Image (cartoon, rainbow, N blue to C red):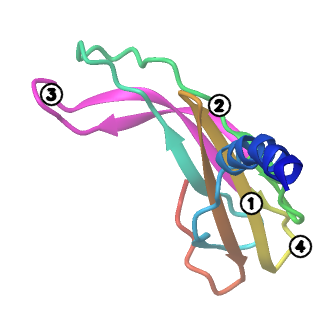
Amino acid sequence: MKRLLTSSAYLLPLLLLAWLVQPAQAQAPKELKTRPGVGVALVNLVNPRADCSINPGPVALPSLKQKPANGNILMQIIVTDVASNGTCPARKMPTIAIAYAPRKDFTGVDAVELEIDTDNRATMLSYRITVSAQAQAQPL
């Protein structure tokens, strides 16, 4: 009995550690709609500096955890309007835009998952993209 308790004492910390080091849990997928061959923005990544400058701070690039089966993921540097906050006025800043572009001949549903790691914390972004000829595309 004593031997069983001793081995259990060693296993408990390992089980606790395994529970704490689980992968990031995905959110409920964000629903997007587009037409065949028309790209749709997934996320814009920006890190405004506290000094109100137009130069952005460092941004963690996402990793692709689930590749789309019927399209491509695009990354582009764009200029975005950043709202005012505190002492900083509204301004335009460069951001990293991640987008999905379906194949021109594809209609149906596709899925994408991105993971962003910042400060030892992983955030999973999930997207469910419906591609149909009747869809109102949300422009890039």
Residue extent of the magenta highlight: 74-100
Residue 13: which quarter of the image?
Answer: top right
Q: Which residue is mark 1?
A: 112
Mark drawn on residue 103:
none
Q: Quadrant of the N terminus?
A: bottom right
Which amino acid lies under the numbered mark 2 shown in the image of this protein? Leu
Q: Which residue is at 88% across, 47% downward?
A: 3
Which amino acid lies under the numbered mark 1 shown in the image of this protein? Val
Within-10-Å neighbours for mark 4: few <14, some 14–19, many 20+ = few
The reply, left or right, for residue 86 in relation to residue 82 is: left
Find numbered disc 3 in the image and state the secondary structure of the residue it sits on. Answer: loop
Taking depth in this image into account, of 109 and 131 the one nearest to the observer is 109
Within-10-Å neighbours for mark 3: few <14, some 14–19, many 20+ = few
Mark drawn on residue 89:
3
Alpha carbons under labels 3 and 2: distance apart: 26 Å
Find numbered disc 2 in the image and state the secondary structure of the residue it sits on. Answer: loop
Label located before the other in sequence (3 or 4) = 3
The reply, left or right, for residue 107 in relation to residue 122 is: right
Taking depth in this image into account, of 92 and 120 the one nearest to the observer is 120
Alpha carbons under labels 3 and 4: distance apart: 44 Å
Q: Which residue is mark 2?
A: 61
Residue 86 within the segment the image draws in magenta: yes
Label located before the other in sequence (4 or 2) = 2
